[in-house]
Image (spheres, helix red, strand yellow):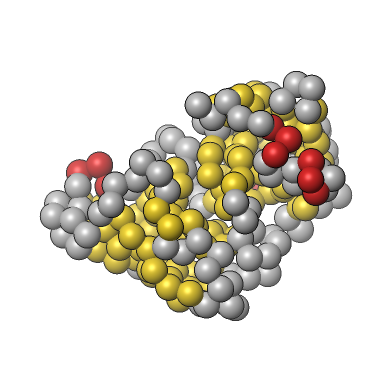
């Protein structure tokens, strides 16, 4: 069974940093693209960033709104993917979901999400 | 960026109704489209990928169609469990983008 478990959310001040973690299990981690998707309170879904699989050298892509501030990385030995967030803004407040993509890159599985609140 | 526009934003329907949600892309995405269902306080769940492929375990009353720029999600006979918010998403190019959502309410 595919499981994705996020952790690391919380309250942070504007300009601060936070690292989210996602522990994956139930599948061969290195075979899959992993994405982060966020959802501001009462709003829609926004894709944040992607780490491709081993066959694609774990290369990354980012949304323009976070590029240069957020970094997606992964640790194959821990079957984990991370979202390092710097220079946080109030508009980064959201539930952050860790996801696994399949096939041609569609998001197939979602974690339960972790809430990040950026506020003074 | 490819913009995804869903209609309607809200849909009121009754159990047993056939409902259709439309998703339009601002440029050709061939069939690289997914549909998700989200219930309050829960993570989204994949229903359809590649425009018309039903995800394993999803009831057959859900179906997807379309290609290019216009797509539809159809629920053939609404069940109580289907009242939720539905999102489309393109994965043709980066950034991946979602529609704004369609809230399916009980009439």
In the image, residue B7 sits, relative to residue B58, either above or below, namely: below
Examine the rendered structure and indicate whether residue B80 appears above or below residue B35: above
Which of these two is toward me, B37 or A105?
Answer: A105
Position of residue B63 measured from the top left corner of the image (x, y, whole percent): 33, 60
Residue B75 image point, x, y percent: 27, 58
Residue B31 position, x and y percent, is 52, 68
**Nearest the camera: A92 or B6?**
B6
Q: Is residue B81 left or right of residue A67?
A: left
Q: Residue at x 43, y 73 (%)?
A: B66
Q: Is residue B13 above or below residue A107?
A: below
Can residue B71 be spotted in the picture?
yes
Query: For the view shown, which residue lies furthest in the top direction?
Result: A78
Quadrant (top left, top right, bottom left, bottom right) of the C terminus of chain A: top right
The residue depicted at 56 percent of the width and 64 percent of the height is B32
* Figure quadrant of residue A84: top right
Q: Nearest the camera: B52 or B10?
A: B52
Regarding residue B101, the answer to whether it shows in the image is no
Q: Residue at x 68, y 36 (%)?
A: A118
Q: Is residue B31 left or right of residue B85?
A: right
Which residue corresponds to the image point at 78% horizontal and 28% vertical from the top-left? A76
Image coords of residue A80 (percent x, y): 72, 27
């Amino acid at each position: 069974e595919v499981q994705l478990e996020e952790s690391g959310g919380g309250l942070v001040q504007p300009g601060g940093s936070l690292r989210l973690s996602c522990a994956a299990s139930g599948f061969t981690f290195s075979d899959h693209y992993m994405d982060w998707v966020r959802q501001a309170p009462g709003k829609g879904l926004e894709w944040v960033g992607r780490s491709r699989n081993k066959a694609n050298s774990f290369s990354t892509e980012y949304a323009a709104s976070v590029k240069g501030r957020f970094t997606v990385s992964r640790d194959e030995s821990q079957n984990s993917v991370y979202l390092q967030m710097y220079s946080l803004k109030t508009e980064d407040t959201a539930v952050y979901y860790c996801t696994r993509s399949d096939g041609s890159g569609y998001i197939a599985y979602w974690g339960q999400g972790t809430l990040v609140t950026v506020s003074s | 960026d490819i913009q995804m526009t869903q209609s309607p934003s809200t849909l009121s329907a009754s159990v047993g109704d056939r409902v259709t949600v439309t998703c339009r892309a601002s440029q050709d995405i061939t069939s690289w489209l997914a549909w998700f269902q989200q219930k309050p306080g829960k993570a989204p769940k994949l229903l359809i990928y590649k425009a018309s492929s039903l995800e394993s375990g999803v009831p057959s009353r859900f179906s997807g169609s379309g290609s290019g720029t216009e797509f539809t999600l159809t629920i053939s006979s609404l069940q109580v469990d289907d009242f939720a918010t539905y999102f489309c998403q393109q994965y043709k190019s980066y950034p991946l983008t979602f529609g704004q959502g369609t809230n399916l309410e009980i009439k």
